[in-house]
Image: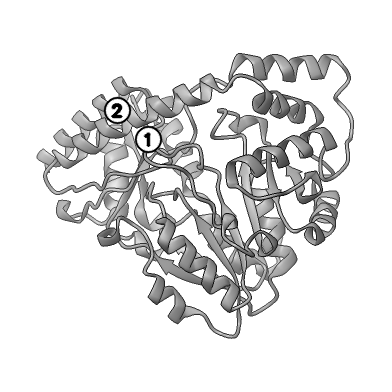
Amino acid sequence: MKLAQRMSRLGTETAFEVLAKARALEAEGVDVIHLEIGEPDFETPSNVIDAGSAALNNGFTHYNPSPGFNELRDRIADEISSTRGISVTGDHVVVTPGGKPIMFFIIMALIDQGDEVLYPNPGFPIYESMIEFVGGVAVPMRLYESRDFSIDVDEVASQITDRTKMMIVNSPNNPCGSIISNDDLEKLADLAKEHDLIVLSDEIYNRFLFEGDYQSITSFPEMRDRSIILDGFSKAYAMTGWRIGYGVMPVELVEPISRLVTNSVSCTASFTQMAALEALNGSQDSSHEMVAEFKHRRDIIVAGLNDIPGIRCAMPKGAFYVFPNIEGTGMSSQQFADRLLNDAGVACLAGESFGEYGTGYARFSFANSVENIEEALDRIKKFIASR
């Protein structure tokens, strides 16, 4: 069967491919430590599970409005208003089955053939994939290790042309765990206003900030009405399999984005929305405890990697990933990742999975137990020494 030509422009998320390889090795009896997948290893909080179960038992098994239940949309708006310092209402919110649909729908709704979109590189691979799938031109904003994996604002400014329509910002960043400083974030906001750019702000890791307070680009003057916040429940509440995310956007975008929801998935599952409502309304202790544990794990994995010859690892300020430079091992990123899995039973991702500027790096998720992280570090050290 012949695929449409546009399918050749559609990328993938390598984490799921590596996970499949690791599972296949496990089926053969190989002991694998999983540091490849970006998924909290905690269970969804019990109060959230109970709310989802109660919703199922109380008839929340039917269609609901494409942008989501008003009760949840209003509560999300309250949360965003208080945490980002902006004023939004439920009319600004669209609820979707996960965060990726917001990414896809926004790019599909706003980017025409030939429009240029600035995006972080190394960065989440679906940005580039979606931009190119709809016929846009993906323009990488390079993250520099020498800048703690942040951008060079002057370089970004030089990349803007009369075809540039959108800028994607992700802070804390996947895969680097880096943040954009408040000063640089304000400069990016100024560039967006100067050149009339739309900003898609991927804030899915906003709660996973290990130092300082979270800053959203939407909080700068005049940015609310040219920005879309992407957020969700997968990371902060360990709800990856529940598939629930949302976008907060200018009101005029809500109807067309809701139309895309109608045409694709109809709506987000009703019972998951009730679980999400409880996540926001209930105790936040589980979420805070999870972030504290991730900070502890971060310190262990960074120290351990820096103790291995040929590897140097910057200290991430957020998310739950490290992005060490592995050039000193003499292997390419892909060789390193492949051999580490096959020879040492440690699953990670090659840096180029996150774009051309990821070459020479690898991504490890520290969403695993301290015991497993320490065992993985020991295996990596022995693997490097045996070469």
Name the residue carrying label 2: 373
309 w.r.t. 7: above or below? above
Placement of 253 over or under 313, stated as above or below: below
> Is any part of residue 258 visible from this angle?
yes
Quadrant of residue 318 in the image? Answer: top left
Indicate the position of residue 153 as horizontal and vertical percent values.
40, 71
The location of residue 203, given as percent across then percent down, is 55, 48
Q: Residues within 10 Å of mark 1 (few under 14, many from 20)?
A: many
Could you say which disc has been placed on residue 35 in the image?
1
Q: Residue at x 74, y 59 (%)?
A: 250
Marks 1 and 2 in Cβ contact (< 8 Å): yes
For the C terminus, the image quarter is top left
Callout count? 2
Q: Nearer the viewer, residue 199 or 334?
A: 199
**Label 1: which secondary element:** loop
Residue 148 versus residue 142 in the image, above or below: above
Q: Relative to 376, is 246 on the left or the right?
A: right
Residue drawn 70% across the image and 38% down it: 78
Residue 22 horizontal side relative to residue 68, left or right: left
Query: Between 271 and 160, which is closer to the camera in this rendering?
Result: 160
Q: Quadrant of the N terminus?
A: bottom right
Residue 95, given in percent of the width and then of the height, sits at 75, 42
Q: Residue at x 80, y 19 (%)?
A: 55
Distance, label 1 to label 2, CA atoms, is: 8 Å
Which SS class for mark 2? helix
Q: Residues within 10 Å of mark 2 (few under 14, many from 20)?
A: many
- Is residue 368 in sight in this rendering? no
Q: Position of residue 225 (x, y in %)?
A: 70, 62
Q: Amino acid at mark 1?
A: Leu
